[in-house]
Amino acid sequence: MVPLPAQGHLHPLLQLSAHLTNHGIDVHYIGSATHNRQARHRTHRGFHSLIASSSHRLHFHDLPFPSIPSAPPTVNPLLAFPSHLQPSFDAAAAHLIPHLSSLLLSLAPSHRRIALLLDSSMPFAATTASLIPNVEIFVFYPCSAISSLFFLQQSLGKLDENPILPGLHTRVSIHDCISDVFLEFLFSQMRSQTAVIAGRIMNTSHAIEGAILDQLAEEWKVERVFAVSPLIPVTAVDGEHHEDECVHWLDQQPTASVIYVSFGTTSSLSSEQLRELAAGLAASDQRFLWVLRDADRCDVFAAGPDARHVNQEASTELEEILKRVGEKGKVVQGWAPQMEILAHPSTGGFISHCGWNSLMEAAGMGVPILAWPMHSDQPINAELVTTVLRTGIWIREWGDMGEMVNAAKIKEAITRLMTGEEGKEVTRRARELGQKLRAVVQDGGCSKDDLDGFVAQILRP
């Protein structure tokens, strides 16, 4: 397993690793010591229960990458992602190959076949690995199928001819949401990659993106794309209970009454936007659980005396909100158990940046989305949720990027979801989708069939 060194790319491959170990397959997970530690630390409890009986088959390899300063995400919505992460990607490209080759060469003599799973953003590792006769190369796509198809078609100029799906005419441009430097990083690696790809694995389900997966298979000229998600079975966390302040607070709230707010680990808000969000939550008069991570308050990374000023300002704002809303709102600073929060019966909606992992987790739990995309694949994911699946409502459409989302707009979106007729229909569709995703990982379900098919391809005689 070779993930891209970015948080949203670490988890899906680690979760897939757990499934493969349960099929008796030894898995070697490769990355820097820092990213391997992050992957292990931030996994969901359902992951640990999934891998409990086969953890001895999962081997982490800490490769000696140079130390790269961890730059904060930018609050500037017009600065394309992932500019602040590019040094890590460049380091991976420069230092991974010799260590990966050494590991593969050490494993090759004692194994009939080695399946090398590369993150779709790490294609440069394929050519060297293909020189080893018993290595087969698979590509894993941690993002949505619709974003993969969108970026592929836009790079080929095909979106000018036809929409991705009938009726879906997006205003998103690849250059608006991904930096040109990262695009060149990807395209240069793809141009140099000449290895034969044995299969493509997608972090999605035919229940969500069936028509899009069919289009991708046609574009790639393959008979089958393995769509294996949800990778954490919803039954592994559904009803799970443990001691956590978020879960304990949710236990005290009415069913489907709480708006969960989280923007992931790579998105950020300015101090001004933070204040508008706080005011909108308070004005909505709805219960909310707001997980305020470092990435949500980027200004705290400011150097010098300004850093202390911004920290104090943010703390004062939060104190004022909590005083106004009383027991209706809870703000948690730091990490929170997102899967348990989404699985909790008190959770009625999710204000999300529309990162694909978060959307898949929400879909599996039947939770509707209030869409606030920030960068990368998030805008097209938001289009899928709001326009195709209709399990979400926009807070900020991508065409309005760069504009401040004021408190009134935030309040309006929350009210539409939590009290309006539109919200009832959106919630109904979200719950129906959650039921479908429970079924796809059971015997006879499409995702389980695809996972079993992928395993069979690896283990064939």
Image: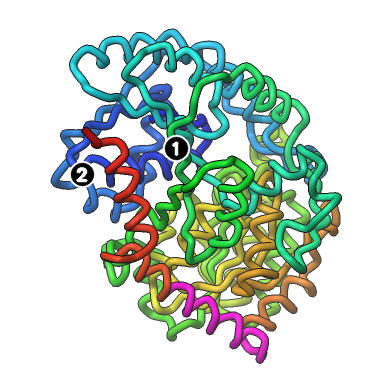
| Residue 448, x across and y down, in percent | 33, 57
Query: For residue 303, what is the image quadrant?
Result: top right
99 and 237: which is toward the camera: 99
Who's the residue at 44% across and 17% down the image? 130
Can residue 313 be seen at all in this image of the molecule?
Answer: yes
- The three-letter amino acid code for the residue at tag 2 is His
Mark 1 or mark 2, earlier in chain: 2
Is the residue marked by circle 2 packed among few (<14), some (14-19), or many (20+) residues within 10 Å? few
Mark in the foreground, 1 or 2: 1
> Viewed as shown, does residue 375 lie left or right of 340?
right
The answer to if 427 sits in the magenta stretch is yes
66 and 110: which is toward the camera: 110
Give yes or no for contact between labels 1 and 2 (Cβ–Cβ under 8 Å).
Answer: no
What secondary structure do most residues of the magenta stretch adopt? helix
Can residue 311 be seen at all in this image of the molecule?
Answer: no
> Viewed as shown, does residue 339 lie left or right of 72?
left
11 and 418: which is toward the camera: 11
Q: Decide: is 85 above or below 388.
A: above
The numbered mark at residue 23 is: 2
Which residue lies under the disc numbered 1?
Answer: 199
